[in-house]
Structures are given as C-alpha cells and as structure tokens.
Amino acid sequence: MRLEAITWDRLADQLADRLAGLAPADGGAWLRVGFDGAPAARPGDLAERVGEALRVRGRPSLVVGTEGFLRPASLRLEHGRRDEESYYSGWFDTAALWREVFGPLDPGGSGRVLPDLWDPATDRATRSPYTQLPPGGILLLHGPLLLRHWFPFDLTVHVLLTPGALRRRTPKADHWTLPAFERYEAETDPAGTADVLVRADDPRHPAWGG
C-alpha cells in the first residue's frame, strides 16, 4: 500500500469525513470503529482527535479504551507479571467488551455503553456510569491486538510501528510484551487487514493509506 504524508489533524478530518458517509454494516443505528496499535503507537490519541473532529461536524461519538477492560490481576498475572501468552490471550476482558460495549450497539440495542469496567491501579471495578450513545453515534474503540478478536467493526485503523520503532518507543519495563506483537503481526497481519493504515515511526510525521 502506498502511504502519503499527512498531519494528525488532517488525518482526523479525513477519517471523520469518511465516517460521516459510512453506514453500519449490520443495518443498526451505530458505527463501530477500531483504532488498533501497540501502546507505544498511541492509537488512543488518534481516536480522541477523530472524536473531536466528529464533534465539530455534529456527530456524537464515544471514545473507549481497552485498558479500561483489563481482567483482574489474579487472572492477568496468574502465570507471572511478564508472561507473553497471558498478555496476548488473556490480558483484556473481551467478554465484557462484547457484553458492555458491542452488545448495546447491536441492531435494536439500547445504546447504553459502559466506558470502562476495571481500574488497573486499584484492581477494582471502576463503577463508572453508563453512557448513552444516541442513534447515529459512533463508537471509537482503541487498544492493542484488537483485530484478532473478530469485533464487529465497520472501519478499522491500524497505527503501525516498525519493529525498531516499536522497541525504541516501548519502555524497557514493557519489552517483555514485544514478542506478543511479533506474533500478532505473523498471525493476524494487522497492516494488511485494517481498512486504514497509519505509519507513525516518527510521531511528528505520520503517513497513511486507505
């Protein structure tokens, strides 16, 4: 795929314009967009920018991060604090994401989405109130390893870092997660699977295609 240089603000505008003309694939009332990328790629920053661009256009949206849906530490860390398999397969509560985020946005759903469930700092439920996303609203879900779960996204964006950039921009304390991203690339091919690809090796100068 040929990638073109772009600014983050222009990228957010381009994505917001694309979403404004997109209809939900399931015929429902809500669009669901995934912003996939390693934490070092900061896909949540792009999701927030797109949310702001949608607000300016009069489209309601809700930004949700998978870091708010971690499994309890007793389950996440059952095999140690640096277990690659746990990070890859059991770090996030995907069942809760299906139940509390995607389920309410199914055709005929309530639109009442839980924005987060678990606080990793306290290892307790956040007790956050539900957010009502009105018909025509757009879910902007961001996090790592998103494209391997078959979530029903209407548009997917992958924020790509080369292996060298990923290693440089990942804190050394988190280098144990890097093999999980190598495995993800080999098994899922997020760069080839996503609808939109954003390369962010230099965070000041992104490039995109899609």
Image (cartoon, rainbow, N blue to C red):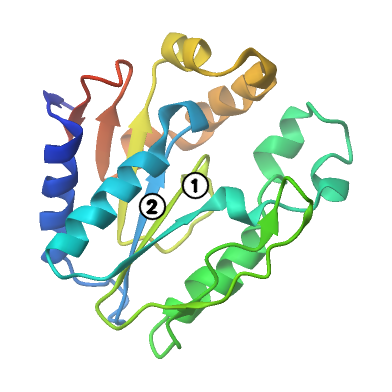
- N-term mark: 2 or 1: 2
For the C terminus, the image quarter is: top left
Q: Is residue 210 visible?
A: no
Residue pointed to by mark 2:
34
Q: Nearer the viewer, residue 126 or 36?
A: 126
Q: Is residue 126 visible?
A: yes
Q: Are marks 2 and 1 in contact (CB under 8 Å)?
A: yes
- Which quarter of the picture shows residue 110? bottom left
At a point 24% along the width and 41% down the height, the residue shown is 196
Q: Amino acid at mark 1?
A: Leu
Q: Residues within 10 Å of mark 2 (few under 14, many from 20)?
A: many
- Which quarter of the picture shows residue 206? top left
For the N terminus, the image quarter is: top left
Q: Is residue 192 above or below residue 48?
A: above
> Real-space Cα distance between discs 2 and 1?
7 Å
Question: In the image, is 111 to the left or to the right of 128?
Answer: left
Count of labels in the image: 2
